[in-house]
């Protein structure tokens, strides 16, 4: 689940954030070099457009193989869609002509952000029976849904009437509530089926620390990799957490955390930094890492195999190299993200393990 909380991501990877945002954007390149798709012997990478999925960005995949993504038609606004059993389902919007998904559960419910008729961005939840529902805010003008569990419980970040950005939880039949993390700034990135929430919080959107909040409100500040800044990006149903932390040496590295092991540095693919976006129920982490050649490649990490390069689809000629990023994974051996390819900067990608 990529769930780009811009301030959190930018603070960790600096200029690399722009590289990620361009990689996830819409830049068509005419020229290309002939470069075969690369992947490990244990996985393969597929251009989703060859499977009839025209999304320009993909954000989430569930255990049924449904994929949430976004694309635009010509001059139309960016819109959220769900790919479901070889059909494309438009999710619509909240009246302002823009929507973007962030997460998807196994019930086919999608959450994300959409523009309202008054021009504000609000969190939403969508399902095929009820359509798109505006989750409101905490009194301000902005909210964004970033995670949803299989109970339909939603977490994210919303503005208060004082202008603060605060982590929220929303449950069906209720209203958006502040999670009460005792800091000025907080953002909830993910929630598991036991209603355990992870995210980041601190005095402002540039200074923060990874947290875990259980269903009873018990707050745990997770350790770092030696630096002062960290964020928890995802949690699985066993309470294992994936995220990113500044290291004592300075660069940011992806991390794995559990009560049994404490925090583990995932390392890199030979470069300085790595980033963990999601973790499966088997404890596999996906994200990206900088290689020794200064390329950003999608990666998969497990306790048994360490970090594995997931490769790229190809490389535009003007670059001479390829980049990729994996943003979400399911529990049946699939991950989605973006990759450079032969004729363009980016394409929606599926990895199968």
Image: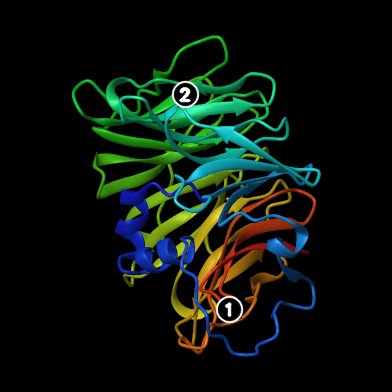
Is residue 192 among the parts visible in the rendering? yes
Q: Which residue reaches farthest top?
A: 173
The tag earlier along the polypeptide, 1 or 2, is 2
Q: Relative to 11, is 345 on the left or the right?
A: right
Residue with the mark numbered 2: 169
Q: Position of residue 211 (x, y in %)?
A: 42, 40
Task: Check whether the beta carbons of the residues at disc 1 and disc 2 lie within 8 A of each other.
Answer: no
Q: Nearer the viewer, residue 31 or 299?
A: 31
Q: Residues within 10 Å of mark 1 (few under 14, many from 20)?
A: some
Q: Which residue reaches farthest left?
A: 162
- Please tell me whether mark 1 sits on a helix, a strand or a loop: loop
**Which residue corresponds to the image point at 53% horizontal and 54% vertical from the top-left?**
277
Q: Relative to 164, is 12 on the left or the right?
A: right
Q: Calculate the distance from the C-alpha at mark 1 to the C-alpha at mark 2.
A: 42 Å
Q: Position of residue 109 (x, y in %)?
A: 65, 30
Is residue 158 among the parts visible in the rendering? no
Q: Position of residue 190 (x, y in %)?
A: 52, 38
Q: Residues within 10 Å of mark 2 (few under 14, many from 20)?
A: many
Give residue 343's mark. 1
- 282 above or below 297? above
Q: Nearer the viewer, residue 200 or 49?
A: 49
Q: How many callouts does the rendering have?
A: 2
**Which residue corresponds to the image point at 46% horizontal and 68% vertical from the top-left?**
27
Give residue 101's mark. none
């Amino acid at each position: 689940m990529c769930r780009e909380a811009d301030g959190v991501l930018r603070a960790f990877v600096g200029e690399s954030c722009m590289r990620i945002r361009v990689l996830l954007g819409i830049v068509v390149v005419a020229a290309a070099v002939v470069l075969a798709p690369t992947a490990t012997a244990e996985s393969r990478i597929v251009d989703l457009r060859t499977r009839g999925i025209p999304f320009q960005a993909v954000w989430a995949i569930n255990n049924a193989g449904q994929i949430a993504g976004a694309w635009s038609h010509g001059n139309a606004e960016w819109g959220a869609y769900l790919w479901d059993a070889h059909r494309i389902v438009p999710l619509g919007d909240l009246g302002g002509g823009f929507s973007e998904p962030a997460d998807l559960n196994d019930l086919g419910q999608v959450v994300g952000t959409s523009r309202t008729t008054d021009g504000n961005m609000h969190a939403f939840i969508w399902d095929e029976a009820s359509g798109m529902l505006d989750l409101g805010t905490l009194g301000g003008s902005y909210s964004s849904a970033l995670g949803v569990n299989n109970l339909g419980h939603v977490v994210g970040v919303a503005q208060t009437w004082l202008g603060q950005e605060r982590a929220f939880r929303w449950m069906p039949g209720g209203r958006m509530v502040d999670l009460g993390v005792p800091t000025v700034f907080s953002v909830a990135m993910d929630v598991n089926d036991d209603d355990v929430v992870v995210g980041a919080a601190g005095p402002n959107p540039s200074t923060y620390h990874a947290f875990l909040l259980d269903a009873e409100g018990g707050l745990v500040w997770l350790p770092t990799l030696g630096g002062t800044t960290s964020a928890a990006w995802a949690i699985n149903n066993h309470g294992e957490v994936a995220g990113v932390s500044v290291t004592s040496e300075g660069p940011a590295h992806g991390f794995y955390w559990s009560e049994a092991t404490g925090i583990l540095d995932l390392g890199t693919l030979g470069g300085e930094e790595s980033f963990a976006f999601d973790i499966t129920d088997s404890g596999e982490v996906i994200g990206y890492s900088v290689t020794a050649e200064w390329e950003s490649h999608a990666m998969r990490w497990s306790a048994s195999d360490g970090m594995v390069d997931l490769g790229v689809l190809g490389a535009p000629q003007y670059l001479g190299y390829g980049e990729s990023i994996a943003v979400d994974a399911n529990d049946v051996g699939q991950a989605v993200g973006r990759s450079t390819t032969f004729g363009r900067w980016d394409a929606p990608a599926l990895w199968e393990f």
